[in-house]
Image (cartoon, coloured by chain):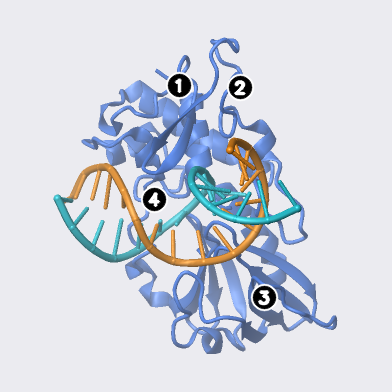
Chain colours: A blue, B orange, C cyan
Amino acid sequence: MPELPEVETVRLGLVPVLEKHRIAGVALHRSGLRSPFAGNFAATLQGTCVLRLRRRAKYILADLDNEHTWLIHLGMSGSFRTMAAKKTFKPETHDHVVITLDDGLRLIYTDPRRFGQMEVFASTAEAMHPALSKLGPEPLDDGFDGPALAARLRAKKIAIKIALLDQRVVAGVGNIYACEALFKAGIDPTTPAGSITVAKTRQLATAIRQVMSDALASGGSTLRDHRQLDGSTGYFQHNFAVYGHEGAPCANCTCKGKQSVQTITQGGRTTFFCPVKQV
DNA sequence: CCCACGACCTGCTGGC
DNA sequence: TGCCAGCAGGTCGTGG
């Protein structure tokens, strides 16, 4: 599912469920997700209180009261739902992790494709964590602007679209929002990243921030799997200008529908763009 | 270091 | 109706 707006939407939904609550029980319904649950995963969570939920890039981080951090990545198809612990629970096929909270709520993690990730690590080791240590700037943080982005793109020869998917360049951007931001900024997705002008780089940074915050305000985008905890969908998918619109006139473009949205494959993923606006 | 590509998994869609 | 190729919001490892 999940790029920054979807992950942040899920985090916000988890806050009232987890923060200041004690984990009474952890049940694992298989040995792992993308990789096996590391050694003491369930035992380390068991009995701890969640102090705070944070997000970094596409990771949700829960600070526990035992000096450990619980890391969650939703992969492509991960989602959470809750149900009262009193109810009988019969796990469905892809319900992999079931957490019981001290207030009698049950939190269920479902992930059909199992590209997700869950682990616990000592909080002091966060700065050295392989998945977290190399991440680029958060696009919604104050410091993210044209120069900050330019510094990460400098000298790169790879296509800008591919660079935007690199989490070391900007954190939290995925295929949808990379396409949408490049459209908004009017940049050809195949442009070598390091050759984009200062002015265009500034527009791109602004476009990334705008797309991310607009999507967040809409609860993210639901193509298939993304759900809030109560099962409701995001609705930013209705505002896509180009993503998923191959052959259709792009929104608000100078081509006025005469040209249509086209697709190319970059890095094995589909890029949607307007050949008139994005030059 | 850079980059292209396949692997990891399941489910859905569209074409035949 | 059934089967199968192709594709899907992400990351990681390998090889050139």
Residue A266 on image: x %, y %: 38, 38
Tell me the tag on residue A248: 2
**SS category of the residue bearing label 1:** loop
Gap in Å between the C-alphas at discs 1 and 3?
45 Å
Nearer to us: label 4 or label 2: 2
Residue matched to label 1:
A186
Sooner in the amino-acid sequence: mark 1 or mark 3 = 3
Whether tag 4 and tag 1 are in contact, CB under 8 A, the answer is no
**SS category of the residue bearing label 4:** loop
Residue B11 drawn above or below residue A213 = below
Give the crowd class for mark 2: few <14, some 14-19, many >=20 residues within 10 Å. some
Residue type at mark 3 is Lys
Q: Nearer the viewer, residue A83 or A258?
A: A258
Whether tag 1 and tag 3 are in contact, CB under 8 A, the answer is no
Is there any visible trace of residue A204 in the rendered image?
yes
Residue type at mark 1 is Gly
Sooner in the amino-acid sequence: mark 4 or mark 1 = 4
Tell me the tag on residue A167: 4
Sooner in the amino-acid sequence: mark 4 or mark 3 = 3
Residue matched to label 3:
A20
Gap in Å between the C-alphas at discs 4 and 1?
22 Å
Residue A72 on image: x %, y %: 53, 67
Gap in Å between the C-alphas at discs 4 and 2?
30 Å
Nearer to us: label 1 or label 3: 1
Residue A139 on image: x %, y %: 47, 43
Residue A81 drawn above or below residue A235 = below
The chain that hosts pointer 1 is A
Q: Are discs 4 and 3 located on one and the same chain? A: yes
**SS category of the residue bearing label 2:** loop
Residue at x 64% of width, y 44% of height? A221
Gap in Å between the C-alphas at discs 4 and 3?
31 Å
